[in-house]
Image: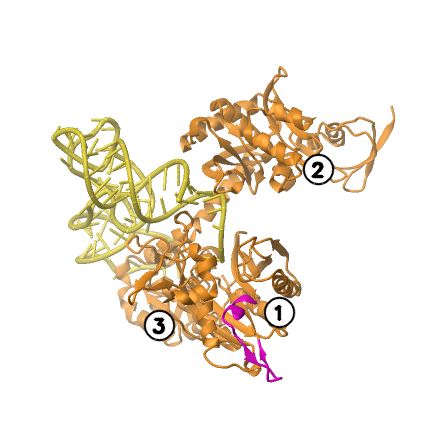
Chain colours: A orange, B yellow
Amino acid sequence: MSQITVTLPDGSSREYDRGTTVQQVADAIGKRLGQAAVAAKVGGVWVDLGHPLDRDVDLAIVTRNTDEGREVLRHSTAHVLAQAVTRLFPGAKYAIGPAVADGFYYDFELADRATFSDSDLERIEAEMSSIIAADQAFVRDEVDFDTGRDVFADQRFKVEIIDKVRAGAADADDAGEVGADAAAVSIYRNLDADGAVCFTDLCRGPHVPSTARLGAFKLMRVAGAYWRGDEKGPQLQRIYGTAWEDRKALEEHLHRLEEAERRDHRRLGVELDLFSFPDEIGSGLAVFHPKGGIIRRVMEDYSRERHEQAGYEFVYSPHITKQDLFETSGHLDWFADGMFPPMELDGGTDYYLKPMNCPFHILIFRSRTRSYRELPLRMFEFGSVYRYEKSGVVHGLTRVRGMTQDDAHIFTTKENMGVELVSLLDFVLSLLADYGLTDFYLELSTKPDGKAVGTDEEWAEATEALREAALTKDLTLVLDEGGGAFYGPKISVQATDAIGRTWQMSTIQVDFQLPQRFDLWYTGADNERHRPIMIHRALFGSVERFFGVLVEHYAGAFPVWLAPVQVSVLPVADRHDDYAYEVAATLTRAGRRVEVLDGHAGALGARIRRAKMEKVPYVLVVGDDDVEHRTVGVNARRSEQPERGVALDEFATRVDTESRTRVSG
RNA sequence: GCCGGAGUAGCUCAGACGGUAGAGCAGCUCACUCGUAAUGAGCAGGCCAGGGGUUCAAGUCCCCUCUCCGGCUCCA
């Protein structure tokens, strides 16, 4: 028998008999590797562990405790889920079941339009456990299209996928199931100990060799989902689960979820008394309470300051306007679904709540003739807009029906557009960093399919200008095909928060359309009329969303400059009250936000606890020694150990510096 | 908008079978005067989301609406 050479990722190579399987190689390298293996890559191509090696190859064995290994575990666990559901729910059709971040899901259509309820999850989990205990083998096979159709004769979704692949119309989802370039479809069967087929799925693989090799899993929730994501298509029942290499990793994941829940801005909003959504007002419409109001005001004040320095001029516009304005702008043609219905006034004139600020700023531009000398003209407004979001999408402060955008429109010459975009991106990233967000990537959204105004050439030019600006930054740029607004492409800045979630923050859009629709022009140096272009941009996106993101990013523990209460002063006993109020007055004069918690709020320990729970950055305890020496005891939020005997002046200076430099955390 | 779940005191939650609502924390009062994460006692607090129905009787059962939660679709 001839030998083949297997080269491993570390560059070492080994000789094996031709026909040796990947599993055998793994076992030969080490017993533990053999057990930890879930799949492998041969020359970069995924294979199962049972794959025989018939020539010299580069081999990477994928183990269960890596991202790729977990993906295999999750995908294989999804198959077990589907098998369990088909066992428990006769007639169930299974659609697709991929691995996703941290887990997997599988979509089903149940007989008689039945639905899953939460209590079904336990039964299904138990069934899955018994399947795993039965140690079923995963066995790959390739069949031609007609055979595939026969195999899945009673599975309409699988048949649809096969037909689509055959017609060469497979999209990414289908490719995940069968491999887009396959002349045949690949299927996986689960076989029990007797070799009987328990379950068959259309699937590209790879999979673990048998269910015994799966790790720890948990079904998380049931949800509705549309077949192929089409809201006009059939609605399927989706089950989400999570799966990990072992029980410990699963527990850690569940713990992380609890952590995320603890910093949920909706929860902290109540606990810290920042904002609320009274039912009496309506869904998606927030009120900010005094403490949230302080944070918001400080956020906005600093933004104004920075905008002023960056050459923006401040404008104001009303919340409602006559219909004609949004007809000219195109909003009623393209954005009507997102607008509140009109109110009829003045004997038949329809007025609309504004969903965007741009037409108003345009009218300001057009209020008189403009010279090239005025450009770029940057108009800024904290503009409140109202959008009729569908009832199911409203979500805390991050998706609301009434919001305030830190909106600006830059009117500039086409020639200057590139320069302006680059400096704008610098401005955006620098401002976000001051609020504590420093981890970004960029997304470029292009012309939406069918829902856009303007020619392809104009779109291409605008898109290219954005791309070029984006490329000057040392950041990842991802493409969002068809994700632009109806009037132009956009770059959005996606920020990653303290626990790794990404949020869409700033958007920058180039617009050739609205200047045309409103017939904007300026007089050039050549004394001719020229069309300006517009850049729409919002840095926070919406103040509400940005607020919500910051709450979660800081887990409610705002840095000093944003904290609603920066310092709590706690007199040890009644006889220290006068001094405590004097300390508070001194700090207040120095610009601090201070509260005094005296004996009415309970014993000293209880008051400290209370201030800590409210995440106040500095708790000052003052007693006899402090009165005598004009000092304070400093219990900083970030430190374990309180300091005693700090001079009041010194403390005031320290906090003032921290506040002015906007130290994060 | 669609699928699933839920709405009881400011917050977190109890309330088998239908018999008319309870706790902890927060709040208020009093006592305590305390040196770094919960002093004690007392008081007050609810149209059980809203509306309709079944019933002698509804927080509990049925229907509708609203709101929230988890997803899908959409999006700042």
- Tell me the crowding category of disc 1: few under 14, some 14 to 19, or many 20 or more residues within 10 angstroms, Cα based: some
Closer to the chain start, of discs 1 and 2, is: 2
Same subunit: marks 1 and 2? yes
- When asked about the image quadrant of residue A464, the answer is bottom right
CA separation, marks 3 and 1? 47 Å
Residue A567 shows in this picture: no
Q: Which residues are magenta?
A: A512-530
Looking at the image, which residue sits at the far top?
Answer: A194
- Considering only order in the chain, which callout, 3 or 2, is on the residue closer to the N terminus? 2
Q: Give the label, 1 or 2, closer to the camera.
A: 2
Residue under mark 3: which chain is it in? Answer: A
The N terminus of chain A sits in image quarter:
top right
SS class, disc 2: loop
Residue A198 in sight from this viewpoint: yes
Q: Which residue is mark 3?
A: A583
**Amino acid, disc 1:** Val
Expressed as whole percent of the image width and height from the top left, the position of residue A214 reads 59, 30
In the rendered view, tell whether residue A586 sits above or below residue B22: below
Q: Nearer the viewer, mark 3 or mark 1?
A: 1
Marks 2, 3: nearer the viewer:
2
Q: Which residue is mark 1?
A: A422
Question: Mark 1, chain letter?
Answer: A
Which amino acid, mark 3?
Val
In x, y percent, where is residue A152?
59, 25
Q: Give the chain letter at badge 2.
A: A
Looking at the rendered structure, the secondary structure element under dot 3 is helix
Instruction: Please give the residue where the numbered disc 2 appears in the rendered image.
Output: A181
x, y percent for residue A481 = 60, 53
